Every structure is written in structure tokens, then in C-alpha cells.
Image: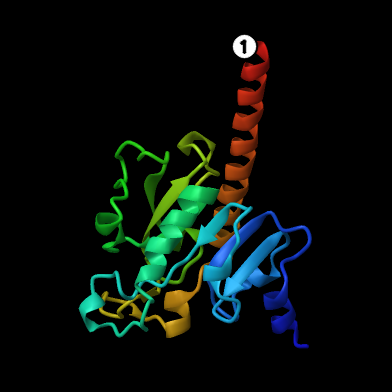
């Protein structure tokens, strides 16, 4: 059995975070404690039990969705991912122009959390090491904003752009448009882990309150 097949066959025994909708060659697969779900493994079969980092396909939701040709059922994966993040805790990542926020009634950045405690923040993947400026939205459930890891800042200017139409840049390759920088992978996984810690602490406080009642 190939190594990639072994990865898809069973989760790591020490996994504490599930990452859904990863590329077959994703760098997440080399991270300790991460249970990766690629197309072969099928994220829709994820049984739950761990907080998640969700990267659902975005081409059916972006500003150029009218030009996209998603596969049957692909668009619905993002809506399914929202439900999983709300149920298990964790974070969902999508482009800043994603129409998912409107259709799924997700709170915009700066707004109060929704009924699931979920809220949105905006980041630029350039600050995490991306070769281009890539504004991104993150929908977070289960990890209070005050508990998020620090967001880095990177100076200088991006040498590439997503479209290649920015002066002084060249267009990103398909891989560069899709990949998640190592620093952002680590940051997102840490957010999911803090979700787990926060939930465990909340359960402990609730149990103590019940004993005192």
C-alpha cells in the first residue's frame, strides 16, 4: 500500500484535529496529530468527534462563480462544512468574496456571533507566507476571539497576484492559488485545538456548577 493510501485509510492514532477537503498532496498530511480527509477519503464520511479545519471547494461561491464548472454536488459541500464546524467546533476558510456568508447567514466580520457562537474574521494569507495577497474569511466556532493565536504581520510587497493583473506582479500558478501556506496551516490547526480546550473547560465548569447546585 502506498503511503498516500495509508493516510486515507485510517486516521493517526494521536489525531486531535480533522482537516476536511485537503488536496491529495496537502502539507497537512505531514503534520502531527492531524487527521486529513482528501477527495479519495471523502470528507462527507467524516464521523465527527474532533474539531475541524474545513477548506470546502470555493469555485461555486466566488465572484467568478458564473464562469466556474463545479462538479454535481460540489457547491453543497460548503454548506455541509458550515454544519460540521458548528457541530464539532473549529474553523472554515473561504475567499473574502465568497457568497457562502450570505446564503448560510454567517455573521460578517465585526458583527456579533451567531446562535452557534460562530463569528468571522478576515485575514490576508500574504502575512502567513503566501506569494500573493489573498484576502480570506474565516468562520470560527468554539474558540473565543480572545483565545485566537496571534495573527502575524509581514512587510514588503507580494511578487505575485491571483490574477496577474496587479502592476509589478506575475500570475500565481494553479497550485499557488490553491495551497495553504505552512504558517497558516499551523495557525488554523491551533485554532481548532483551542476550540477543543475551550469546550473541555466549559464542560468542566458546567459540571462543577451542577455539583454546587
Residue under the image location 69 percent in, 82 percent down? 4
Q: Quadrant of residue 104?
A: bottom left
Here the colouring is rainbow
Residue under the image location 30 percent in, 85 percent down? 69
Q: Quadrant of the N terminus?
A: bottom right
Label 1: which secondary element: loop
Q: Looking at the image, which is closer to me, 164 or 102?
A: 102
Q: Quadrant of residue 78?
A: bottom left
Residue 152 appears in the rendering: no
Estimate the x, y position of residue 74 in percent, counting from the top left: 38, 76
Q: Is residue 196 above or below residue 8?
A: above
Would residue 155 be found to the left or right of residue 30 on screen? left
Q: Quadrant of the C terminus?
A: top right
Estimate the x, y position of residue 3 in percent, counting from the top left: 75, 83
Would residue 204 be found to the left or right of residue 62 on screen? right
Q: Is residue 2 above or below residue 132?
A: below
Q: Quadrant of residue 194?
A: top right
Would residue 27 be found to the left or right of residue 73 on screen? right
Q: Is residue 34 above or below residue 89?
A: below
Crowd around label 1: few <14 · some 14–19 · many ≥20 (10 Å): few
Residue under the image location 66 percent in, 28 percent down? 204
Q: Looking at the image, which is closer to me, 105 or 171?
A: 105
Instruction: Name the outermost residue toward the left.
Output: 66
Estimate the x, y position of residue 190 in percent, counting from the top left: 60, 50
Q: Looking at the image, which is closer to me, 66 or 10?
A: 10
Q: Looking at the image, which is closer to me, 190 or 6?
A: 6
Instruction: Name the outermost residue toward the top.
Output: 213
Q: Which residue is mark 1?
A: 213
Residue under the image location 75 percent in, 87 percent down? 2
Q: Is residue 65 above or below residue 198?
A: below
Residue 22 appears in the rendering: yes
Amino acid at each position: 500500500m502506498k503511503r498516500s493510501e495509508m493516510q486515507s485509510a485510517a486516521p493517526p492514532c494521536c489525531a486531535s484535529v480533522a482537516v476536511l477537503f485537503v488536496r491529495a498532496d496537502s502539507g497537512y498530511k505531514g503534520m502531527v496529530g492531524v487527521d486529513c480527509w482528501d477527495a479519495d477519503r471523502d470528507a462527507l464520511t467524516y464521523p465527527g468527534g474532533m474539531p475541524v479545519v474545513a477548506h470546502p471547494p470555493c469555485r461555486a461561491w466566488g465572484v467568478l462563480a458564473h464562469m466556474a464548472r463545479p462538479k454535481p454536488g460540489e457547491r453543497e459541500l460548503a454548506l455541509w462544512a458550515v454544519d460540521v464546524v458548528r457541530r464539532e467546533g473549529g474553523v472554515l476558510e473561504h475567499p473574502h468574496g465568497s457568497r457562502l456568508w450570505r446564503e448560510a447567514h454567517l455573521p460578517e466580520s465585526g458583527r456579533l456571533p451567531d446562535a452557534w457562537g460562530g463569528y468571522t474574521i478576515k485575514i490576508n494569507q500574504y502575512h502567513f507566507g503566501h506569494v500573493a495577497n489573498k484576502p480570506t474569511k474565516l468562520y470560527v466556532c468554539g474558540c473565543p476571539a480572545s483565545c485566537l493565536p496571534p495573527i502575524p504581520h509581514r512587510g514588503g510587497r507580494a511578487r505575485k497576484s491571483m490574477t496577474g493583473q496587479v502592476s509589478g506582479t506575475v500570475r500565481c500558478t494553479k497550485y499557488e492559488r490553491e495551497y495553504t501556506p505552512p504558517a497558516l496551516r499551523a495557525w488554523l490547526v491551533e485554532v481548532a485545538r483551542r476550540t477543543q480546550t475551550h469546550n473541555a473547560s466549559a464542560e468542566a465548569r458546567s459540571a462543577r456548577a451542577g455539583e454546587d447546585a
